[in-house]
Image (spheres, rainbow, N blue to C red):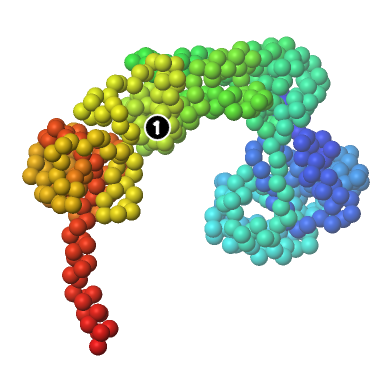
């Protein structure tokens, strides 16, 4: 009967385990000196060797003739554990045996001594799937098990384990296996299986596996079923990397801000039964690859793709900005979250596609920065020319308004023009009767400012137009150049004269002089 490669080539000793030397050397030394803990916890991502090391440790602990802490694989115990005739090593899948009753049965069985071995070993896989009640039932036995019982817990999600479990175990963290180590193992297996594999194909498999040797061997098994000579093209087809031209076409149109073509492509993919959640995920990964190219010196080590696709990624990276890429990823991540609960996934995907094609309608920070950068580039290339300033709005010989600095009762916003001959007296505040007409013009040119200037009035003092407004945020508005220019323009159109702006504070000074509380204090002080 045919055995898949990852089962056939499962390591039988600690020395055979790839990429986990920091763990295997410790376990082998503990077995060699006879200091085997009563409970171990193996954590790490899938395919990194947790269950394999658990089986090797169980076998080494019971081996009759261990060699440097490794099982000999020749004695009756090793062979019995391998062929299943010795049942003193029990593997439990916590995903399907996660109840309190299952753990109670385990505790009762643990009281019985092993039949053929020194230790009864319980390997509990995916232990994070146990219920809270099951964890509580396991605590006491896990802390003080019988002398003949050992526990090895394995999990991919250690954060889900209670602290009471973690504190009772000797913990080992399994790392993702590097592509170089996976490639070496693949070449070794291929050579012994009479499979010819190119170096670039082996490296591509190791990148696709994402640190999981079991996944790499599964891909190798799949590729060997296609051809005895495995190339990168065969790996690409077997792993589903090929046939992604629609992603490059979508991103090209997104970079050209062409929502019509993008929506047409989405409609075509939808009609071809493409899942919108999968499409969104693929687009996020596509933009992630472009982001890596634009930010990393050696990006090919971090991107899983063929050499041909990598060149296409580089061309697309040259046509877009990093801010645009980040904005697209942000929008697509939001879309991915909404798609899970959306009643119409196609519509949700189309909405997000329009947002990333037309940055002007997106309000997130990355989109705004991208829009600013596009404007700067356009101005730098001479595609945008500043509009000429009219004499009425901004006189030609005047500087931009400066923020109000309240050093005196009024502070001018800009350098004064030559004052007209019939200006009001510089020492007398004269009520400006045309202020209503000024507000009427502001209703057309600056509605937000008009809302601030409700119940306001103005006084003329020499070359100044002093505005009296009780709204506390008026002083902030008047410091902004666009609002100040709007007022000056409106005053100019009503009076035909150019005034400097100031804030009227005369009444406040009078109020301070006539403050009854201040008068009372003065009277008390004079007693």
**Residue 88 position (above or below residue 509):** above
Residue drawn where x is 69% and y is 37% of the image: 176
Name the residue nearer the viewer: 215 or 250.
250
Is residue 249 placed above or below 351 in the rendered structure?
above
Residue closer to the observer: 304 or 116: 304
Horizontally, is 185 left or right of 463 in the view? Answer: right
Instruction: Note whether residue 348 is visible.
Output: no
Q: Is residue 72 above or below residue 236?
A: below
Q: Secondary structure at mark 1?
A: helix
Quarter that holds the C terminus: bottom left
Q: Quadrant of residue 394?
A: top left
Q: Quadrant of residue 93?
A: top right
Quadrant of the drawing holding the N terminus: top right
Instruction: Between residue 12 and residue 215, name the one nearer to us.
Output: 215
Residue visible at 76% across and 14% down in the picture: 196
Residue reaching furthest bottom?
527
Q: Nearer the viewer, residue 209 or 514?
A: 514
- In this rendering, position of residue 440 left or right of residue 317: left
User: Would you call the spot at circle 1 few (<14 residues within 10 Å), some (14-19), or many (20 or more)?
Assistant: some
Q: Disc 1 marks which residue?
A: 368
Q: Is residue 399 visible?
A: yes
Residue at point 31% right, 38% down? 415
**Residue 309 located left or right of residue 461:** right
Estimate the x, y position of residue 255 in percent, counting from the top left: 44, 18
- The x and y percentages for residue 106 are 65, 56
Image position of 507 with respect to 87: above or below: below
Q: Position of residue 285 (x, y in %)?
A: 53, 27
Residue at 59% over, 28% down: 295
Which quadrant of the view contains residue 150?
bottom right
Q: Is residue 505 left or right of residue 253?
A: left
């Amino acid at each position: 009967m045919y055995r898949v490669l990852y089962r056939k080539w499962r390591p039988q000793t600690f020395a055979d385990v790839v990429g986990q030397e920091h763990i295997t050397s410790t376990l082998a030394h503990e077995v060699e000196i006879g200091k085997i803990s009563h409970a171990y916890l193996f954590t790490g991502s899938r395919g990194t060797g947790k269950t394999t090391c658990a089986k090797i440790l169980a076998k080494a602990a019971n081996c009759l003739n261990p060699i440097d802490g490794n099982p000999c694989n020749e004695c009756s115990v090793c062979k019995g554990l391998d062929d299943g005739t010795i049942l003193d090593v029990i593997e439990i899948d916590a995903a399907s045996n996660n109840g309190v009753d299952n753990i109670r049965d385990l505790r009762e069985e643990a009281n019985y001594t092993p039949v053929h071995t020194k230790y009864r070993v319980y390997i509990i896989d995916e232990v994070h799937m146990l219920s809270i009640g099951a964890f509580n039932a396991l605590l006491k036995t896990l802390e003080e098990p019988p002398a003949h019982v050992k526990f090895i817990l394995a999990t991919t999600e250690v954060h889900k384990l209670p602290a009471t479990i973690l504190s009772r175990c000797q913990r080992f963290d399994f790392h993702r296996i590097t592509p170089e180590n996976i490639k070496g193992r693949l070449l070794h297996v291929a050579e012994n299986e009479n499979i010819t594999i190119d170096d670039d194909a082996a490296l591509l498999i190791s990148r696709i596996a994402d640190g999981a040797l079991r996944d790499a061997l599964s891909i190798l098994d799949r590729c060997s079923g296609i051809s005895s000579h495995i190339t990168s093209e065969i790996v690409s087809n077997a792993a589903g990397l090929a046939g992604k031209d629609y992603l490059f076409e979508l991103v090209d149109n997104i970079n050209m801000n062409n929502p019509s073509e993008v929506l047409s492509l989405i409609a075509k993919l939808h009609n071809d039964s493409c899942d919108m959640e999968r499409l969104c995920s693929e687009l996020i990964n596509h933009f992630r690859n472009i982001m890596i190219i634009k930010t990393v010196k050696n990006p090919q080590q971090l991107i899983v793709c063929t050499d041909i696709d990598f060149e296409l990624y580089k061309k697309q990276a040259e046509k877009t900005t990093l801010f645009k890429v980040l904005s697209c990823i942000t929008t697509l991540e939001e879309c991915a979250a909404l798609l899970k609960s959306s009643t119409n996934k196609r519509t949700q995907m189309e909405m997000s596609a329009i947002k990333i094609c037309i940055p002007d309608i997106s309000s997130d920070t990355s989109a705004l920065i991208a829009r600013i950068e596009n404007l700067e580039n356009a101005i730098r290339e001479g595609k945008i020319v500043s509009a000429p300033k009219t004499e009425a709005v901004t006189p030609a010989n005047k500087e931009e308004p400066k923020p109000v600095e309240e050093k005196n009762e009024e502070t001018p916003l800009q350098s004064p023009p030559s004052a007209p001959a019939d200006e009001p007296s510089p020492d007398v505040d004269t009520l400006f009767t045309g202020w209503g007409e000024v507000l009427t013009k502001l209703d057309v040119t600056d509605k937000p400012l008009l809302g601030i200037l409700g119940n306001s009035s103005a006084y003329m003092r020499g070359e100044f137009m002093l505005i009296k407004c009780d709204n506390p945020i008026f002083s902030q508005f008047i410091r902004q150049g666009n609002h100040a220019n709007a007022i000056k323009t409106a005053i100019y159109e009503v009076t035909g004269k150019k005034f400097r702006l100031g804030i009227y504070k005369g009444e406040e000074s009078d109020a301070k002089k006539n403050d009854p509380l201040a008068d009372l204090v003065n009277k008390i002080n004079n007693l």
